[in-house]
Image: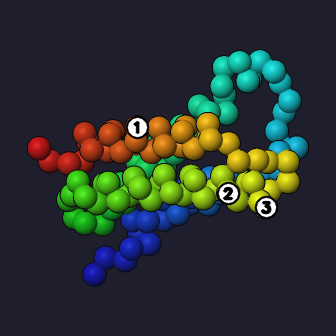
Amino acid sequence: MKHPARYFLPVLTWLILITILLTLPGSAFPKANWLDKIWLDKWIHVGLFSLLQFNLTWSAYKFNNKQLRVSTLIWLTIGSITYGIAMEFVQKFWVPNRSFDTGDIIADTAGAIIGAVYAWRRFIKK
């Protein structure tokens, strides 16, 4: 019998890392105007959530004997997006000097979709 931790430890580790990064107080970030011009914050969100989505999908794929259904991929993607939205509320209500940002939700969603598309192309048999 397979132990789920074997497959889900990487995604759990990544989820903990993302949670730590998203709950750092706003004062912990450097104040540089040029970073705003290249939307660095949004690109970081895209990267974090595309890797989260890929890790989730890879874990499910390995746990299910290298089989993955489209419905599973869709539910995992919805879960990633929901997590991103929830973290914006956490930032708004519980993290000092952080606020709710719709742009971050869009970037999180884009990242989750990018990760899902990559995983779909890699893991779902045609």
Say which label, 3 or 1, has the lower sequence index: 3
Q: Nearer the viewer, residue 110 or 29?
A: 110
Q: Amino acid at mark 2?
A: Phe
Query: In the picture provided, is 52 more to the left or to the right than 45?
Result: left
In whole angstroms, how far apart are the C-alphas of marks 1 and 2?
A: 23 Å
For this view, does 109 lie left or right of residue 24?
Answer: left
Q: Which residue is mark 1?
A: 114
Mark 1 or mark 2: whose residue is earlier in sequence: 2
- Alpha carbon of mark 3 to alpha carbon of mark 1: how far? 29 Å
Q: Is residue 65 above or below residue 116?
A: below
Please name the residue that numbered disc 3 is placed on. Answer: 94
Foreground label between 3 and 1: 3
Under mark 1, the amino acid is Ile
Secondary structure type for disc 1:
helix
How far apart marks 2 and 3 lie (CA) works out to 8 Å
Question: Which residue lies at the image location 31% right of the left edge and 76% below the top edge?
Answer: 2
**Which is more N-terminal, label 3 or label 2?**
2
- When the figure is inspected, residue 50 is found, relative to residue 18, above or below; the finding is above
Q: Quadrant of residue 4?
A: bottom left
Q: Position of residue 78 (x, y in %)?
A: 41, 55
Q: Residue at x 83, y 45 (%)?
A: 26
In the rendered image, which residue does mark 2 sit on? 89
Check the image and report above or below for 6 versus 11. Answer: below
Q: Which mark is residue 44?
A: none
**Contact, CB < 8 Å: mark 2 with mark 3?**
no
Viewport quadrant of the C terminus: top left
Name the spot of residue 67 as percent of width and height, x first. Answer: 20, 59
- Total tally of numbered discs in the picture: 3
